[in-house]
Image: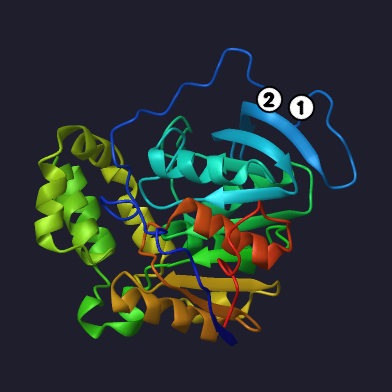
Amino acid sequence: MHDDRSRTPEHAVGPPGVPGAPESAIAPAPLPAGHLSAGQPSAGQPSAGHFSVGHLDRIVHSADGTPLAVSEAGSGPTLLVVGGAFDHHGTPTVDRLVRALRDRYRVVTYDRRGRGASGDTAPWSIEREIEDMAAVVTSVPGPVDALGTCVGAGLVLRGLAAGVPLRRAVLWEPPYRATVDPHADDVLLADVLDEHVAAGHRGQAVRAFLAQVLGLPMGQVTAARLRPRLWRALLADAHVLSRDVRVLGGLAVPQRVAEAVGVPVLVAAGDAGVEWMRAAAAALAEAVPGSRSLVVPGQGHVPDPVVLGHLVDRFTGVDAPSVDPGDTDAH
């Protein structure tokens, strides 16, 4: 593992609000009537690894038949973006990140099963989540790079280990809290979240996830509840939060999974958030063979999308838009 630090502009701070969650309850937009089905190419699609799609919403079916809502935007090499627990089509965090990347990447996002406009087929399993990712990746021109943030970083990690055809990946602040904080180790948390939802206590499930998985202080959790539109958006995803705890291996770095990764990986964190997030990122980088670790000054758990985009550019070698000298130089 190599250690590095990235210089960023002074104004580059993450947006306020709940880490990994939408800042407002913007509902997922329904797929238009003319969406493309899986495998149907867009018009005028060029070859040789550089693709332009404008904006496209379509359906891809996973191996078990579950319909997955996929969105594409932009022009350039293909980049799969997998967000946090509350991130899916139409949420502000995803939309801002797509806008920051689409001028130089073909950005592919999808609603994970049980979220947004995607379907949900029982029983759920990590293996099915990996099959979903593989279905999305193989439905677009390769090679495909990936960017995973928060829980999405943990899912991308599992996809890499299972052989999903991704060329390389940037993983931002995977919340493997139990690896670096013994007080956070709760092997029963996923079951507890399921029990809350089954009892109709979706709010309790959301509060427990925000506090125990993302480490949000209770004052901020309470503040989120006082914003009705935001709170409704969080409650809408309460039933899938236990799945994310399981994807994250009970909040501990899955050593065997990490050791099975065989492609280049950059694990990054900001220095403006909680210390355990940086420690967790470093622990994951230690576990993934040949990976790099990076700390980005001025960034929190929800980073400035422009800064995150420049980080991806550096790792993939894609030419970034003009920026102030030194914005992304390592030292």
Residue 52 falls in image quadrant? top right
Distance of mark 1 from mark 2, alpha carbons? 6 Å
Position of residue 208 relative to residue 101, above or below, is below
Q: Residue at x 45, y 24 (%)?
A: 29
Q: Secondary structure at mark 1?
A: loop
Position of residue 28 relative to residue 212, above or below, is above
Q: Name the one closer to the observer, 317 or 174.
A: 317
User: In the rendering, which numbered label is found on residue 37?
Assistant: 2
Other-residue count near label 2 (Cα within 10 Å), few / some / many at <14 / 14–19 / ≥20:
some
Q: Which residue is mark 1?
A: 40
State if disc 2 and disc 1 touch (CB < 8 Å).
yes
Q: Name the one closer to the observer, 113 or 280.
A: 280
Q: Residue furthest top?
A: 33
The x and y percentages for residue 134 are: 65, 50
The x and y percentages for residue 60 are: 63, 34
The x and y percentages for residue 7 are: 51, 72
> From this viewpoint, is residue 252 visible?
no
Q: Residue at x 47, y 32 (%)?
A: 119
Please state if 239 lies on the left or on the right of 285 as rendered.
Answer: left
Q: Secondary structure at mark 2?
A: loop
The x and y percentages for residue 171 are: 53, 65
